[in-house]
Amino acid sequence: MIETKRALLTKEDFAERDDLPGWLLKEYQTFHDTVTDKTFPCYFGMGGELKGELRYAYVTKDDWSRLPQALTEFLALFDNPKHKRHGLFVFVEPFETEGTLDEYREQFWDILQYLHDVDEVEWPEESPRDPDHHLWDFRFHGEPIFAFGNTPAYKQRKTRDLGNAMVIGFQPRKIFEGLKGTEKGGIMSREKVRERVEEWDHLPKHPDISHFGDPDHNEWKQFFIGDDSEPIVGKCPFTHKEQKKPS
């Protein structure tokens, strides 16, 4: 019987597995070097990478089929309480030539839409389906997850450039227990990180960045922010399966 390789990767896999594509090994090294720079703003990401607490996955430009398995394996980690602060970073095979921010944004939302379309677990009845609702969040296997895109097309917001590949971060909301937007620990932690981000980017906080539950905020807008200080306008590219019109 042929053993199926895990879709979810650990830090050690990049050194030990011989079945990973060359572009992925290169992009992981860039990611590692970037987030472990002592001035990198997000000390949660830095600490997680140094301690081997993060998890990784990859998809090619044309095949995203391993991602649902990787995300499922990742969520299963949280059955063990010691894994509560883990984050997942997914490397997307780079374009042949660097794309525009809009091209990466479209690919980002296409990937999230794909994950939703193949998800076999229905969203809880009380979970808003409309991204314009201030309590909307993305869910997979029933779990609320914060996702955020990082691409080489970010030229000003350098904290969102983690290499030549788009890197999508997935953070289940349960890792923010005790660090929520309205809790003292969350407010202090968030402000410290944002101060460091502004120092790296030489830009003020993006106007679409807030905390979950803010009635004046749309969560989807901070999934993929602009490379400027202008609010995102227009409709969210994501459509819940229940809201799709019959073809």
Image (tube, helix red, strand yellow):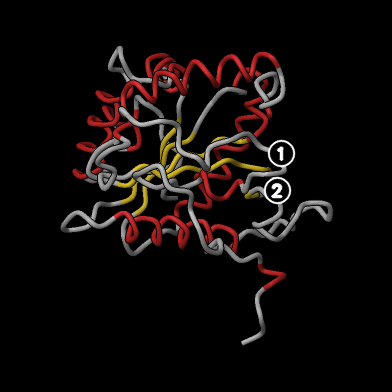
Residue type of the residue flagged with mark 1 = Gly
Q: Please name whichever residue, 26 or 134, is drawn nearer the observer in this view of the structure.
A: 134
Task: Kindly state the secondary structure of the residue where label 2 is placed.
Answer: loop
Q: Residue at x 54, y 57 (%)?
A: 115
Q: Is residue 31 left or right of residue 169?
A: left
Residue 160 picture location, percent across and down: 35, 37
Instruction: Report the amino acid beneath label 2.
Output: His
Left-right relation of 186 to 95: right
Marks 1/2 in contact by CB < 8 Å: the verdict is yes
Residue 204 percent location from the top left of the image = 41, 30
Mark 1, other Cα within 10 Å: few <14 / some 14–19 / many ≥20: some
Q: Position of residue 120 (x, y in %)?
A: 67, 60
Looking at the image, which is closer to me, 33 or 205?
A: 205
- At mark 1, the secondary structure is loop
Query: Can you identify the residue that label 2 sits on?
Result: 134
Name, please, the residue furthest toward the bottom: 247
Q: Residues within 10 Å of mark 2 (few under 14, many from 20)?
A: some
| Gap in angstroms between the C-alphas marked 1 and 2 | 6 Å
Q: Residue furthest right?
A: 125
Residue depicted at 80% across the width and 52% down the height: 124
* Residue receiving disc 1: 213
